[in-house]
Image (tube, rainbow, N blue to C red):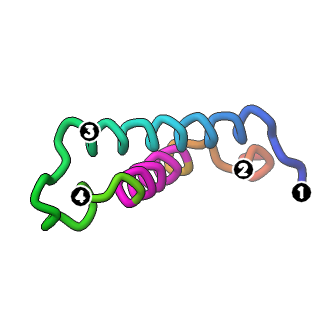
Amino acid sequence: MKINAKRMIRHILFTALGALAGYLVYVFIGCPTGACAITSNPFSSIFYMSLVGLLLSLSISKGCDKCNT
């Protein structure tokens, strides 16, 4: 199984951008009372948004190049 470097960089970039978005959500929208499960804690906010970024990058990645031939 050959790992494509461009695909891997795209996954890492989307995950990092998701983590940054999670931190920004925590800072600007966060839950001051602590009642919100995701936005009250910076670690959970970063984790969930980075997971969303990774899933987004996986969903827009191209399929198998050999499958179409």
Q: Residue at 72% x, 47% y: name it.
A: 68
| Label 3 environment density (alpha carbons within 10 Å; few <14, some 14–19, many ≥20) | some
User: In the image, which is nearer the foreground, mark 2 or mark 4?
Assistant: 4
Please state if 6 lies on the left or on the right of 15 as rendered: right
Task: Please name the predominant secondary structure of the magenta segment in the image.
Answer: helix
Q: Mark 1 packing: few (<14 Cα in 10 Å), some, or many (20+)?
A: few
**Residue 5, x across and y down, in percent:** 80, 36
Residue 3 spot, x, y in % from top left: 84, 47
In front of the other: 17 or 38: 38
Label 3, on which residue? Answer: 27
Mark earlier in primary sequence (1, 4): 1
The secondary element bearing badge 3 is classed as: helix
Q: Which mark is residue 64?
A: 2
State the image quarter where residue 7 is shown: top right
**Is the residue under label 4 in contact with that under label 1 (CB below 8 Å)?**
no
Q: Which residues are magenta?
A: 44-57
